[in-house]
Amino acid sequence: MLLSLSFSFLHHFLFSMENKYLNILSFCFSNTICGLLIVSWLARNIIYSNGLRTALAWRRKTRMKKNQDAENKMSLLDLPDLTLDCILEKLSPSELCAMSCVCSELRDRCVSDHLWKKHMEKKWGRLMGDAAVKEWKTHVATLMSCLRNSNPSSSRSNTQKWSLRVAANLKPFSWLKTNHGCYNRCSSSSSPIDSLMYWYSNLESGKFWFPAQVYNRENGHVGFMMSCYDAKVRYDYKTDTFQARYSAHGRRAAEENVTWQRLRPAMIETESRDLHVSDSLQGLRPGDHFEIQWRRTKEFPYGWWFGVVGHLQNCVGEENCRCISDENVVMEFRQFRTESPWKTTVLNRKEHRETGNEVGGFYGGVKKLCTEEEVSTWKRLWPEQVLD
Ligand SMILES: [Zn+2]
């Protein structure tokens, strides 16, 4: 239709033109191909002015959006080192573990000791005394030694690589399974066995039994009230308590659900069977608080017992008290009844080593309690009833 209208209009116009052009133009417009070219030219103009313009605008918009998306998808690793470190320092231990599972580069960053130092100090600093630290170092040294022996050809420079492999095999992240559900993702992860992260994860998972002392052992058994005994303990993250194993002559006692408040770090300078050197006996005066080693027989390990310095029997009273200058000192254990054989004992300030007998037990070394915190910790454990 469009084609026929264009043709008739142009044909009428052509009658007024000179003959030399008439023949050429008539030929052109009477030719179908030439007509089609004109229609095509008109159509292209229409498309360009509307559809194509719209299409180009859409393409431009899409390209801009893609560029914007690319900018929004900037990786965490694209951040400056200092910024990334600041972010990682804000993460909790479990978040750091989860982050270490993302990729090898983040793992290398997340296992760094400087990120774990504050977490160790915050949660475990109080209990990781010298004895526990020594135990952990021995454990790590044993693992490293086993690795070297299992592969004598491994050089010193390979130690780090081997330690990584051991850590991976031991799967230190099992404690995350219940709390955070990322155990499966992390099971193939690893941390060097001499890293703080590995130590922390071994504590949290309860894999590391460490030396500590337990107040009122065996759930406040009447025979141990107001005492503190050496034990090997391990953490149970499900209950946020500890399991304890005690060493004793003739039997091995154990206990569960030991609370944080009932634990203190073990002493490295005095093993449970060693006699503590009493260096504070000379200065003890009535009212001072102390701890003294005591054991039932010489086959048993010592426990530390809480007591208060009393007055000598011949002391005339508070105002004229001369107990401080006497060669003997009265040690009172006020948790017991007056008639109890364990209520008091008297020690010689200069000569004391270990005194006692198979009936009343043996009293060992003495240490004076110097801080209010030590005393108040003991007083919180005071029994509800006086003991026999
Ligand atoms: Zn006195």
Image (spheres, grey):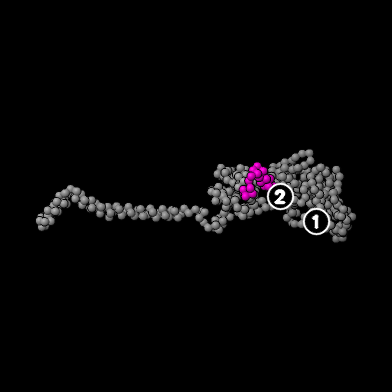
| Quarter of the image with the C terminus in it | top right
List x then y, in percent, for residue 87.
55, 55
Residue 54: which disc? none
Considering depth in this image, is 316 or 176 the residue closer to the camera? 176
Dot in front, 2 or 1: 2
Residue 134: which disc? 2
Element class at badge 1 = loop
Instruction: Give the side of residue 341 with respect to residue 37, left or right.
Output: right
> Residue at left 75%, top 54%?
375
The residue under label 2 is which amino acid type?
Answer: Lys
Q: Is mark 1 within 8 Å of ligand 1?
A: no
The residue under label 1 is which amino acid type?
Answer: Asp
Instruction: Give the side of residue 177 with respect to residue 30, left or right.
Output: right
Residue 224, picture quadrant: top right
Residue beneath disc 1: 288
List x then y, in percent, for residue 58.
35, 53
Is residue 9 positioned above or below 218 on the image?
below
Outermost bottom residue? 319
Q: Look at the magenta stretch and give its main secondary structure.
A: helix
Considering depth in this image, is 333 or 194 the residue closer to the camera? 194
> Residue at left 67%, top 43%?
149
Outermost front residue? 153
Q: How many marks?
A: 2
Element class at badge 2 = helix
Q: Please provide the residue range marked out in magenta.
A: 133-160
How far apart in space, not on screen, are marks 2 and 1 (Cα)? 32 Å
